[in-house]
Every structure is written in structure tokens, then in C-alpha cells.
Amino acid sequence: MKKEFRVKDNKDFQLVFKKGKSFANRQLVIYYLKKENQEHFRVGLSVGKKIGNAVVRNRIKRYLRQAFHELGDRIPPNYDIIIIARQPTKDMGFFEVKKSLTHLLSKERLLKR
């Protein structure tokens, strides 16, 4: 994922947590905040140490980045989105992660048809 598509600064994360909305399923938690003057959506990923070792955490982040890459043209451009992985994601494959992410984004109407 290109740099302009990432939320990296702690202040940006905190802004989305404080002012944004959240929604969750069993595998993922999503926080999102609408920003009017933004050219494209930005994504921040968080996978805690309780989920597994570095190999497992990096695999989950890779799956999430790839899912966003594939869904990118269906996501509206003016959102900051933070994804937090929960414990069950460590046993999931790519297609299960993508399905879970798609389900969450669809529920919150962040995914165009």
C-alpha cells in the first residue's frame, strides 16, 4: 500500500478513535472518520501482541493490506479507516479475512456496490 493511503501518525489514530464511529464483528474492529478535504481513503492497521508472534501479526497485516488493495475502488475517498484485528484472525486465511472485512465495510455502508 502506498504511503498516501496509510494512517501512520499517533495523532491521526487518536483523532479517529475519539471522533470517529466504530463497528465490530468477531474477527475485526473498524473505526472510521469522514474527512472532507481528502483525495483518497487512508487505512491504519493494528494487530496486538496478544494475537501471536511477529510472523503471525505481519501475516494478518499483509492479508488486510491486500484486501484493501482489492477493494480500493469500492471505498469512498474521504475516509480514514482504522482496523484492529481480534484473536480469531490468527487462524484465518486471506479469503476469510477479506470476507470479514467486506462484511464490516458493507454493514457501515463504506463499500460501494
Image (tube, rainbow, N blue to C red):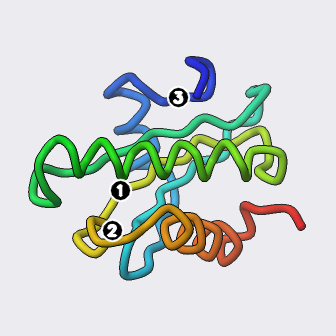
According to the image, label 1 marks what residue?
Answer: 84
Separation (CA) of disc 3 from disc 1: 14 Å
Foreground pick, 82 / 103: 103
Among the 4 quarters of the image, the one containing residue 39: top right
| Label 3 vs 1, first from the N-terminus | 3
According to the image, label 2 marks what residue?
Answer: 89
Dot 2 amino acid type: Thr
Among the 4 quarters of the image, the one containing residue 52: bottom left
User: Could you classify mark 3 by the number of other residues whose Cα lies within 10 Å: few (under 14), some (14-19), or many (20 or more)?
Assistant: some
Q: Quadrant of the N terminus?
A: top right
Left or right, 67 with respect to 13, comes to right
SS class of the residue under badge 3?
A: loop
Residue 60: x %, y % from top left: 36, 52
Q: Quadrant of the C terminus?
A: bottom right
| Label 3 vs 2, first from the N-terminus | 3
| Label 1 vs 2, first from the N-terminus | 1
Dot 3 amino acid type: Arg
When the figure is inspected, residue 106 is found, relative to residue 4, above or below; the finding is below
Residue shown at the point (55%, 53%) measured from the top left: 32
Residue occupying the far right of the picture = 113
Residue shown at the point (78%, 39%) measured from the top left: 77
When the figure is inspected, residue 66 is found, relative to residue 7, above or below; the finding is below
Residue shown at the point (47%, 56%) measured from the top left: 31
According to the image, label 3 marks what residue?
Answer: 6
